[in-house]
C-alpha cells in the first residue's frame, strides 16, 4: 500500500445514525491502519447534507468545537487517528475536496442524513461521489461481527462488473473473509457466454490471491435482486458489494429493509489500476 496514510470519511450530523456508521469505520480503520475523517457538511442550498440555511461563523465554530471533541474521543478510545472537518457550501465540491485532501479510500455513512430539510437519494449520492472514485458504504445498523466474515457479490455478464474486482480482493485480503459470488439465472446464450467469461476471470484473480470463494446461481423463480438480498440474509452477510449500476437500479428509493446489510457501491468509472495499491 501507499506510504501516505489513508482515511475513511464519515459524514457527521451528531445523530445515532452517524454513531452507527462510525462503528463500521472504526472497525475497518483498525484492521488496515487507516485514519478517520469526520465531516460535517452543510449544503445550505438544501438536499443531501443540507439544512436549508447558511450557518453563521459562530455556529460553525460551535460545531467545530463539538466535532473536534468527538474526534479526540474517538482517537483515545479506538487508537485510530481521527480528524474533524466542518464545511458549508456545495456538497459535491466540498466532499470531493475532503476526499482528495485526506487521501480517502472509502466513505461510510448511515442511510439517512437526519435533519428536516435533507433527503438522501441514490442519484444525489452518486453525483457527489462522481469524480472522487472511491467506494462508499451505506449502513443501517451496527456491525454484525467484530470483523467482516461474509461478503456477497452479484456477478453478471456486464464487463463493468470487473470494476469491483480490485475491491473484492482488497476486502478479502485484509479481512480473510469469504467471497460469495452470486450469478443470475440466464437463458440467453450470448449473455451466458459473457457471464462465463466474467466468472472465469474472477475465479482466476481470486485464486491467484489465495482467496476463499464460492459461486452460486440465483433461483430461476426469483428476481436477481431478491436472490442477492435473500442469500445475504441467509448467510448473515456482513456486506453486499455492487457496482453503481445495481446500486442505482435496486436502491433507487429509500428502502430500510435492504439496508439490514451494509451496501458497498463502486462508483462509476472506477478502474482496477486506481486500486492496484491495495492488492
Image (cartoon, helix red, strand yellow):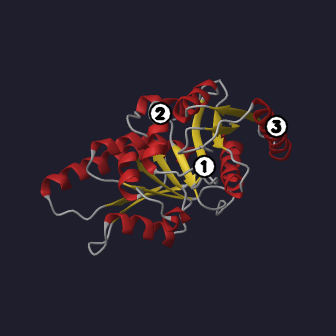
State the image coordinates of residue 61 (x, y, percent, origin top left): 80, 32
SS state under label 1: strand
Disc 2 to disc 3: CB gap under 8 Å: no
Q: Residue at x 42, y 57 (%)?
A: 251
Disc 1 to disc 3: CB gap under 8 Å: no
Q: CA distance from mark 1 to mark 2?
A: 16 Å
In-image side of 190 versus 174 (left or right):
left
Q: Earlier in the sequence, mark 2 or mark 3?
A: 3
SS state under label 3: helix
Residue count near mark 2 (Cα–Cα under 10 Å), binned few <14, some 14–19, many ≥20:
many
**Compared to 1, does 148 lie above or below?**
below
Residue found at the very far left of the displayed protein? 189
Query: Which quadrant of the figure has residue 74?
Result: top right
Q: CA distance from mark 1 to mark 3?
A: 23 Å
Residue 63 seen from this side: yes
Which mark lies nearer to you, 1 or 3? Answer: 3
Q: Residue at x 41, y 33 (%)?
A: 272
State the image coordinates of residue 63 (x, y, percent, origin top left): 78, 39
Q: CA distance from mark 2 to mark 3?
A: 32 Å
Work out whether residue 129 or residue 23 is closer to the camera in this orientation and state it.
Answer: 129
Q: Earlier in the sequence, mark 1 or mark 3?
A: 3
State the image coordinates of residue 233 (x, y, percent, origin top left): 50, 70
Residue, disc 3: 62
Residue, disc 2: 133
SS state under label 2: loop
Work out whether residue 218 or residue 18 is closer to the camera in this orientation and state it.
Answer: 18
Q: Earlier in the sequence, mark 1 or mark 2?
A: 1
Q: Residue at x 14, y 59 (%)?
A: 188
In-image side of 117 versus 231 (left or right):
right
Residue 109 — which label?
Answer: 1
Which mark lies nearer to you, 2 or 3? Answer: 3
Residue count near mark 1 (Cα–Cα under 10 Å), binned few <14, some 14–19, many ≥20:
many
Amino acid at each position: 500500500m501507499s506510504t501516505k496514510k489513508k482515511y475513511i470519511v464519515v459524514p457527521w450530523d451528531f445523530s445515532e445514525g452517524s454513531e452507527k456508521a462510525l462503528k463500521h469505520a472504526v472497525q475497518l480503520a483498525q484492521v488496515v491502519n487507516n485514519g478517520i475523517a469526520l465531516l460535517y457538511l452543510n449544503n445550505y442550498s438544501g438536499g443531501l447534507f443540507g439544512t436549508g440555511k447558511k450557518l453563521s461563523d459562530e455556529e460553525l465554530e460551535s460545531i467545530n468545537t463539538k466535532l473536534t471533541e468527538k474526534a479526540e474521543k474517538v482517537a483515545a478510545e479506538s487508537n485510530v487517528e481521527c480528524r474533524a472537518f466542518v464545511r458549508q457550501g456545495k456538497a459535491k465540491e466540498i466532499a470531493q475536496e475532503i476526499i482528495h485532501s485526506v487521501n480517502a479510500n472509502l466513505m461510510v455513512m448511515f442511510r439517512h442524513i437526519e435533519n428536516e430539510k435533507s433527503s438522501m437519494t441514490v442519484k444525489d449520492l452518486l453525483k457527489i461521489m462522481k469524480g472522487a472514485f472511491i467506494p462508499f458504504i451505506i449502513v443501517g445498523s451496527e456491525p454484525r461481527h467484530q470483523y467482516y466474515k461474509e461478503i456477497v457479490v452479484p456477478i453478471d455478464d456486464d464487463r463493468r462488473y470487473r470494476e469491483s474486482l480490485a475491491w473484492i480482493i482488497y476486502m478479502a485480503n485484509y479481512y480473510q473473509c469469504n467471497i460469495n459470488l452470486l450469478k443470475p439465472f440466464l437463458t440467453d446464450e450470448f449473455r451466458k457466454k459473457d457471464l462465463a467469461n466474467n466468472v472465469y476471470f474472477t475465479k482466476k484473480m481470486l485464486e491467484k490471491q489465495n482467496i476463499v470463494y464460492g459461486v452460486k446461481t440465483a433461483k430461476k423463480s426469483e428476481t436477481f435482486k431478491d436472490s442477492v438480498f435473500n442469500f445475504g440474509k441467509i448467510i448473515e452477510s456482513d456486506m453486499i458489494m455492487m457496482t453503481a449500476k445495481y446500486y442505482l437500479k435496486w436502491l433507487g428509493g429509500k428502502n430500510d429493509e435492504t439496508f439490514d446489510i451494509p451496501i458497498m457501491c463502486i462508483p462509476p468509472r472506477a478502474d482496477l489500476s486506481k486500486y492496484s495499491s491495495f492488492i
